[in-house]
Amino acid sequence: MASAENPFTSLSRVMHEPNRLALISVLAAAVDGLSFNDLKEACQLTDGNLNRHLKALEDDGIIAQRKEAANGGRPRTTITLTPAGRRRFVKYLENLEEVLQHA
């Protein structure tokens, strides 16, 4: 824990945002990743909102996006947790558990 006076300082700000936490949680259960549309539906986000959160997570190295040519000409985007992102998520959950124990 980062600080006995303020246990919340150990929580990752990028992961603690509710929509990002939902995205990471859904992706943690999807070993092969999810398509953009499946992730959008699972987290009930708009295209724009999902794109904004994915950019923040990708910029921080938590997720990776892979675009592939799909039948019909439209690319298919698959989103996965990176290995580092998965480790950081586990650490985040450990820190959250410690915070909750202090409640």
Image (cartoon, rainbow, N blue to C red):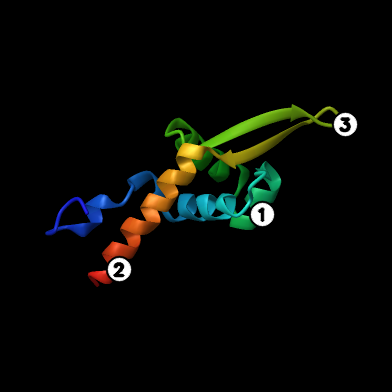
Residue 39: give x, y in percent of width and height: 64, 49
Marks 1 and 2 sit apart, C-alpha to C-alpha, by 29 Å
Alpha carbon separation for disc pair 3 and 2: 49 Å
Q: Which residue is mark 2?
A: 100
Q: CA distance from mark 1 to mark 3?
A: 21 Å
Residue ID for mark 1? 41
- Contact (Cβ within 8 Å) of mark 1 with mark 2: no
Q: Is residue 76 above or below residue 102?
A: above
Q: Residue furthest right?
A: 72
Nearer to us in this view, 90 or 63: 90
Is 40 on the left-hand or right-hand side of 73?
left
Q: Can you give x and y, in whole percent of width and height, for residue 75 in the image?
A: 75, 30
Give the labeled residue for mark 3: 72
Q: Residue at x 24, y 56 (%)?
A: 8
Badge 1 amino acid:
Glu
Query: From the viewer's perspective, is 49 left or right of 41?
Result: left
Relative placement, left or right, of 91 versus 43 is left
In this view of the protein, which residue sits in the foreground, 87 or 92?
Answer: 87
